[in-house]
Structure formats: structure tokens, C-alpha cells
Image (cartoon, coloured by chain):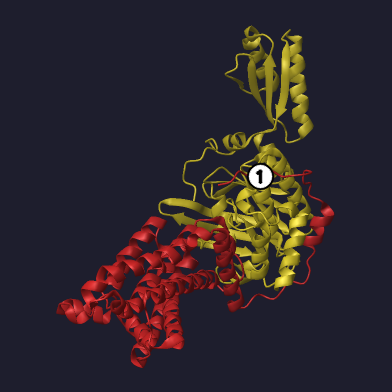
Amino acid sequence: MSATTTETGTTYVPAAETLGAVLAPGARPQRPSALSASITFGWRAMLKIKHVPEQLFDVTAFPIIMTLMFTYLFGGALAGSTTEYLQYLLPGIMVTSIVMITMYTGVAVNTDIEKGVFDRFRSLRIWRPAPMVGYILGDMFRYAVASLVILVVGLILGFRPGGGAVGVLAGVGLLIAFSFAFSWVWTMFGLLLRSEKSVMGVSMLVLFPLTFLSNVFVDPETMPGWLQAFVEVNPITHLVSAVRSLMGGTTDTGEVTLVLISGAVLVVVFGTLTMRLYNRK
Amino acid sequence: MTELGTGPAIETSGLIKIFGKNRALDGLDLTVPAGTVYGVLGPNGAGKTTAVRILATLLRPDGGEARVFGHDVLRDPDAVRGRVSLTGQFASVDEDMTGMENLVLIARLLGYRKPGARDRAGQLLEAFGLTDATDRQVKNYSGGMRRRLDIAASILSTPELLFLDEPTTGLDPRSRNQVWDIIRIVVAHGTTVLLTTQYLDEADRLAGRIAVIDHGKVIAEGTPGQLKASVGAGSVHVRLRDASQRPEAERVLSKALDAPVQLEADPVALTARVAGEGIEHAAAEQAARALSELAAAGITVDDFSLGQPSLDEVFLALTDHPATSEETAA
């Protein structure tokens, strides 16, 4: 960290007039709406990105590595050529990368909650979930950045989506919407667990099986029956199918609806648990 | 300023909070009159911060009642939140953000529109002498500047009740004086201040009334004068020129002050408690008499001072144990 600076110029002497002026009970503004408070916290998350840009590393370098690694690792073996495999893999690797970085929401909540500034937020008369929604709004920006990075890398490597720009945009939109819902799992763990390390540990435990035991890398037909059963109920499988269909120009309305429903369930269940923990903290 | 007439700013009765096996609050009764600085004095782990956190709606009590301007903290937390502000023991500002951004954030959360929020933030930065540091990240602020920004953020809403949880702990003397001046100005404008502190001196200078708490209970309450009267007026510290005269000095002092005399590690130093009747000059008179008796006995005194009772002495007088933390802080 940089050195602490001391006061420059003349020493500050609290003056009755200037302090009195700011203490004059002027017209207090109206309490902000739920949306306005949430967006303000989202703005805070963006400011933190501005001041600590290193934290964008995991939404730029990490997705590039993931895409390159799996395209060249499995491409030749599974689909005969990397370009061909990419058509199948890219939507899935995008889902995997974004879903994996949702865990940083939990890490951010966990590191913030111990700080005094969180007490200030909690003692303000605002819509209670606003700070949590703010984190996730800021993270949605990060998800958008990561999606864009993966898309660009994919296009360079030869990904040619059949759904065109509209299909790709719809796919990314659905993915970010689902990630918003999924992030509530991490706000809950961020409040529940004692340290940043345990949040990371739990999220790895949840995320690895959820993303790898799915249809991201290979067709589930090749798996043993018991594994197929898990893959079939895994929400990530349905998310990948839906995104793949949107990007490929063969929209599967059933899968898209399923994803939206599971997202709504995630928000209701984990949003409620998060707020219960938040209020009890 | 309150909507509910002239009732007390804070009223708690039998407040209880338990963390595991530790009873952080064990039947806390407080009544804080509106429009004053009220001091809550106690060592680490006495329950000061726990009490403040319950009153600021950050923590739910396990028993008892707490009202802020007549609003129950459990039943109507939003009404309480609309009237109070908290400056916690640890900086309640965001280190990564600039001073301006911190204040704009709070202003926006209070409902100011964007231009209004910037104006308000700018005025506060100026009033708190932080204009030069407007666009600097808070992690590069000095301790005193950080504390001032913290108080500025609390005052942004012009609260009716301001909680200051050990606002001067860890500050250098100059910054501490600035915080004291700010508190005096704030209370002169009608804001009630609940000040927690470990320093009797600080409570004495600022507070109209003081509650001494220990193990989650109020063990003494009153004006600073009443409190000191119950404790004794302080101690006389004497340094002799000649260490060989110390046994004689001890005898003279103990007779003159009618109190036990403590021999310090320094072979020429002695300390004696002055009983005092609660009136400052009585203590000074007694000390002066003791001094002249030392001179009459032919003992040369190099240095002499009359000290206020320390928190340790207050605790020794009020309880049977010294004011050391038992590492049960919440």
C-alpha cells in the first residue's frame, strides 16, 4: 500500500459556522426507491473496479485460458477438428466460465461484511436487499465482459454461430440473467461462512461437479446411466442446451423456459436465505 | 426536534445480549436525555459496542427493551434508522474509494439526486477540512482525516442521534482535539450524541452525564462531578529529591491525606489517593496541605502533580477489580 499522507497546508480547526451550515436541518430528501438504492450499490461496485482494476483479471485472462485449453485439449479427440468442436464447445465453455466466476460475489460479500462500512449500510433506512443486489449488479458487468472476451476468442478461432448476432446476444442475455439468479447462492455463503477461504472452498466443491458433470464438454449419451441421471437434472445442462440453441439459431423454447424457472426458484430460495442471514448478522 | 415530544433520546431496560457463554449485556438500563452528549465509559469487553450496535439496529437483543426516540428497535427499526447515524469503532468508510465518492454514496442512499449529492458531499468535505483530499482514496488518508470523513458521513443525514463508538481511540492528540471540537459543535446544533469511551478524561470533558458500565451492566451513573465524588478526586504524585527521605515522606503524606500511599518503581516517587468531597478545590486544598507538611518535615519535593482519577481508579473504586479487559469483547 502507498504511504499514509498527512494533512497538507494549515492545520484543520473545526469552525462553528461551516459545520453549523452543514448541520442545519434542511429539507431531507425522500427515501430512495428499492431500484435507486440497488443501482447506487451497483455504482459502488463499478467504482471499486475502477480503483482496483486487477480484479478484472478473472473475467479476462481466466476465460481466454479456459477457451484455448479445452478447445485444443479435446477438439482433435472428440470432434476430429478443433474448429468443429468449437461450434459445440463455445456456448458451454462460456457458461462454465461465467458460472465459475459467480463465486467471487460470495468472496466480495465475505470480505466486506467484516468492515465497518457494512455496519453503516445496515444502519441506513434503505430497501434491505439493496446492498446485495448492488454486488450482483456490479458482477453482471463482469459477466458481460467475460462473455464478450470468450466470444471474441471464439470468433477468432473459427466459431460461426448459426443464430447470428441476435442469437448470440439472446444466449449471452439468458446466461447473464441465470448468473444473476445463481449469484444469490454465493451471497448466502458469503454471509454464512467465516472466511474468504472457506467461501472459495465451498464454491469449488459446488462448481466443479456442477459444471463438469454436464453436457458442456461431451454428449451425455457417452456417459454411464447413473451419471446421465445427474446430468439430466443438473440446471447447468439445461442452461447450456438453451444457450447453445439460441446461439445456434435453433431456439429450444422448452429449455429456455426451464432455465428461467430454475433462475426464479434460485432467487426465491437463496435470496430469502441471504436476507435472513443479512438481517441476523 | 423529535416528533414524540421531549422524551429521552434513548431508553433501555434490562437489555440482554448473549454471545455463546458470554453475557455481553446483562440487564443494561440506560436513559439518555435528548440534546446532550451522553458518555458510556467502560473497559474493552464491557458491552459498550454491543449496546451501540443494538441501538443502531445492527444487532438483535436477546432480552429487555430498547427505544430510540420512543421507537422500539425491534418493532420499528426503520423509524430508528431514519433518525440515527453510527460512526463505528472501525472506520465505517470504504478504503478503496475517494472521500468524495464515499460521501456521494451515502448521500445517494439517503435519497439525494446526483447533483444534490455532490453538492452536499462537497460542503461536508469543506466543513471537515478535507477539500484537498476530495479525490484521494481513503486508504491514503491519515487516521485523523479518516475519522473526520467517517463523522462527516454520519452527519450527512443531519441525524437526531449520533453514535460515536470510541471516536478518538488510536488518534494523535491533535486529531483527538479536532474530534472533540466537532462533537461540541454537533451537540450545540441539537443532535444528541452517545459517546463510548475508555477515557474518563474524554467523558469528563464532553459528556453531560456518564454511565460507567462493566460486564454488561451500569455500575454507576451521573454527572461527571457526581461520578468523581464517588471515586475520589484523584491522586497526588510526588517526586522527592532524595530517595532516602521516602519512608518519612510516605508517613507524612499518609497522615495528611488519611489515605494509603503507594511507592512507585522510581525510588523517589510516591502516589496517594485524595479522598476529596467531590469538590475540585477541596482536593486541591488537601493536596496543598500535604505538600506544606512535607516541607515542614524538611523533605524536598522536586515535582508534584494532582491527577484526575484514571479509568482504572474509577473501576477500582466502583468494583473490586481493575479495568482490564478479560478478552471477552464482542
Q: Is residue B222 left or right of residue A41?
A: right
Camera sees residue A138: yes
Q: Name the residue under label 1.
A: A5
Q: List x then y, in percent, for residue B283.
A: 74, 29
In front of the other: A45 or B57: A45
Task: Decide if residue B266 is on the left or right side of residue B280.
Answer: left
Out of B330 and B27, give the one closest to the viewer.
B330
Pick the front one: B4 or B97 = B97
Chain letter of disc 1 in the image = A
Residue B107 lies, in percent from the top left, at 68, 67
Q: How many labels does the image show?
A: 1
Q: Relative to residue B155, is residue B231 depicted above or below?
A: above
Give the colour of chain A: red
- Give, as a three-letter code, the residue at label 1: Thr
Write the residue at 34% across / 60% down.
Answer: A201
Q: Please, what secondary structure does the residue beneath circle 1 have? A: loop
Q: Which chain is assigned yellow? A: B
Coordinates of residue A48 in the picture (x, y in percent): 56, 62
Question: Which residue is depicted at the point 77% across and 43% down?
Answer: A11
Q: In this view, does B219 lie to the left or right of A95?
A: right
The answer to whether residue B187 is seen in the rendering is no
Q: Which residue lies furthest to the right in this view?
A: A17
Query: Relative to B248, is B97 above or below?
Result: below
Q: Is residue B257 above or below residue A146?
A: above
| Residue density around tag 1, few if under 14, some if 14–19, many if 20 or more, within 10 Å | few
Residue at screen point 72% across, 21% down? B304
Question: Residue A211: where, in percent of width, then height?
Answer: 31, 72
Examine the rendered structure and indicate whether residue B279 appears above or below residue B189.
above
Query: Is residue A195 found left or right of B285 in the rendered image?
Result: left
Q: Quadrant of residue B12?
A: bottom right
